[in-house]
Image (cartoon, rainbow, N blue to C red):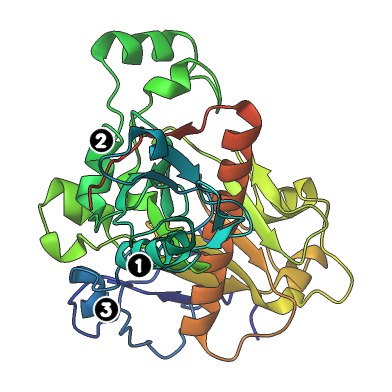
Amino acid sequence: MNHKVLITVALGALLLAGCKSTTGPQFEARPSSDTNAPPTRELDLVTITNTLEPRWLTVPTNVFTLGPGDKLDIQIPGDVTTKSTALVGPDGKIYYYLLPGLDVWGLTLPEAKERLEAQLKEYFREQPQVSLTLRAVESKRFWMMGRVNGAGIYSLATPVTLLEALSRAGGPSVPSPLASLAAGVGGGGGAGTGSSRQESADLKRSFVIRDGKMLPVNFHKLLKEGDMSQNIYLQPDDFVFLPGAMSRDIHVLGAVNQPRAVGFGEEVTLISAISSAGGTIKNAYLSHVAIVRGSLTEPKIAVVNYWDIVKGKAPDVVLESQDIVYVPYTPYRHLTRYLDLIVNTFVRTVGANEGARAVSDGETQVDVNVPINF
């Protein structure tokens, strides 16, 4: 087999809502100037069927239930001495009046009210009627991180769409002309610097994580084209991240000693990127190293034999900024599943790092109390 052979498959329209099964273009990870080189061998084209699930676009029907961190205003009408604010503790209990501890974890507000009244009956001659108000929600929250004007953790007491969540966070950040000019004069600035705070959001690399997996939401279509088929309802613990448009890092993941983001320089090759990540670990499957390029909803993938490159049997690959390099632990069997594994590994890694950085920097903002009267 010729050393110039490169397996490429581009996966178009991946994860787009409501799209039909399609196949996309390919990209040559190792373009050759040798006009006598044989054409690149191609794998069979892969059909993509990933779409948004219709239920994600409908108003959630699950009723709000109490959990640790929630705050309740409680009072027996007509008796001002019984007015109090109770916090649902880590054990799921509230402590009110003479009650030793009332378990409300997982209860709806009507259920909590009924249980309160039943327990308080022992301390009153007549059955007390309790006024119960949800003062603040801390048990049901979502993360809004990255290049938004109000990054932080927000309560999720009532159904919230992605657009509404972005609005609550002040929308994607858009640098002012003066800030852009200052950033250009100062050389841009890296993550965490003052200039990067004025950096605009990269909608093609933005994502939502739910239960450890990326949802197929196309932020560019939603915010630039007004495609409401992308406007999903958020669920508790969803992680929304909008990266900066100026980021040029290459992410090296998988079976390497130090998975990390590698700074993009004048010329970064596959060997230099993997070396910067501490090299490959023992038993890594080097003949199926993947390079993923493009937006997260319309990615392209190339699979190369890294072992041949290291042995000098094949030329090195020049990478582009924002490429994802993945060294597998085992050979892949289905290309679509392989790409799904890579993308989800990438978003989970970025999400974990950004969440940890926000907490350690003390920048995470918990939004104001959201009173809900009952």
- Residue drawn at point x = 33 percent, y = 83 percent: 48
Q: Quadrant of residue 68?
A: bottom right
Pinpoint residue 81: horizontal percent, then vertical percent.
40, 34
Tell me which amino acid carries mark 3.
Glu
In this picture, is 189 found above or below 246? above
Which residue carries the number 2 mark? 171
In this picture, is 197 found above or below 358? above
Q: Quadrant of residue 184?
A: top left
Farthest right residue in view: 282
What's the distance in space between the residues labelled 3 and 1, CA to CA? 37 Å
Task: Say which quadrant the N terminus sits in.
Answer: bottom right
Tell me which amino acid carries mark 2.
Gly
Which residue carries the number 3 mark? 53
Q: Nearer the viewer, mark 3 or mark 1?
A: 1
What's the distance in space between the residues labelled 3 and 2, CA to CA? 25 Å
Q: Tell me if mark 2 has few (under 14), some (14-19) or many (20+) residues whose alpha carbon lies within 10 angstroms of its own.
A: some
Disc number placed over residue 114 in the picture, else none: 1
> Is residue 266 in sight in this rendering?
no
